[in-house]
Image (spheres, rainbow, N blue to C red):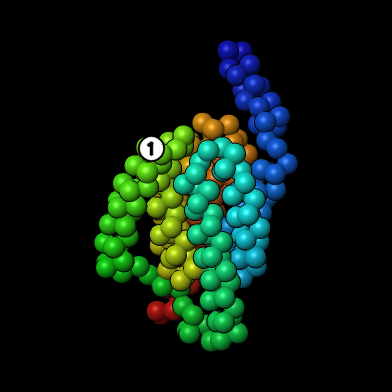
Amino acid sequence: MLLFADPLKESILQFFTQTGWLEWCGVITGILCVWLAAKNNILSWPIAIVSVLIYTLIFYDAKLYADMGLQVYFLFMNLYGWYFWSNNKNQDEQKSPVLSITRKEIILSILAVIAFTYILGNLLHRNTDASFPFIDSFCTACSLVAQAFLARKVMENWLIWIFVDIIYVGVYFSKDLYATGLMYALYVYIAAVGYSDWRKIYRTQHD
């Protein structure tokens, strides 16, 4: 038992000493916006915009350039999601339903992820000092698809987030972004809750 005491103590110490105030702000706003989205609350969008701006700076410093670029996309998608949800919040629920993914969307999403990963991964590998260029590009591609589905209320967005967030946990821990890594571990749980809740809504709509 004592053999594990020192490494565990060191990990906890690193977690608190190497996590800056900016990352903590990103973590708090990130967790809050994802939880609100899982609960179908429109306040998730403005809070997500704050989180996105913070993580643009964090990922630039960590040389995770694909993730940094992803934040720009998230910014526009958060503005779109805020607009889309705002226009439907006072209307009848059936006019803004939770949707299920189609076979065509699955095929197009897979092809888009493969193409995006190959192109961006090679660009980052050859032209930058990016950490994990292909893994980072793959996660970015999956996130692009998931965010688009989230904005359109397609419930399977949460399944994509579960998959990609598990990968992100390992990436961020390896870059000493401990608080962010733990945040993404929590995202896995929140995404599972979100999928369960949205599936219930979807089934209610079709009863």
Type of amino acid at the residue the image marks with label 1: His
Give the residue displayed 27% in from the left and 68% down from the top.
Answer: 104
Inspect this view and state whether residue 193 appears.
Answer: no
Give the residue displayed 53% in from the left and 57% down from the top.
Answer: 72
Q: Residue furthest top?
A: 3
Instruction: Give the vertical position of 205 relative to 50 (above or below).
Output: below
Counting from the top left corner in percent of width and height, residue 59 is at 56, 43
Instruction: Give the vertical position of 194 relative to 131 (above or below).
Output: below
Q: Quadrant of the N terminus?
A: top right
Q: Which residue is mark 1?
A: 125
Q: Identify which residue, 199 or 26, lies in the foreground.
A: 26
Counting from the top left corner in percent of width and height, residue 18 is at 67, 31
Give the residue displayed 55% in from the left and 82% down from the top.
Answer: 88
Which secondary structure lies at badge 1? Answer: helix
| 204 on left or right of 134 | right
Counting from the top left corner in percent of width and height, residue 133 is at 41, 39
Q: Identify which residue, 18 or 192, lies in the foreground.
A: 18
Q: Residue furthest front?
A: 127
Instruction: Give the vertical position of 26 relative to 86 (above or below).
Output: above
State how many labels appear.
1
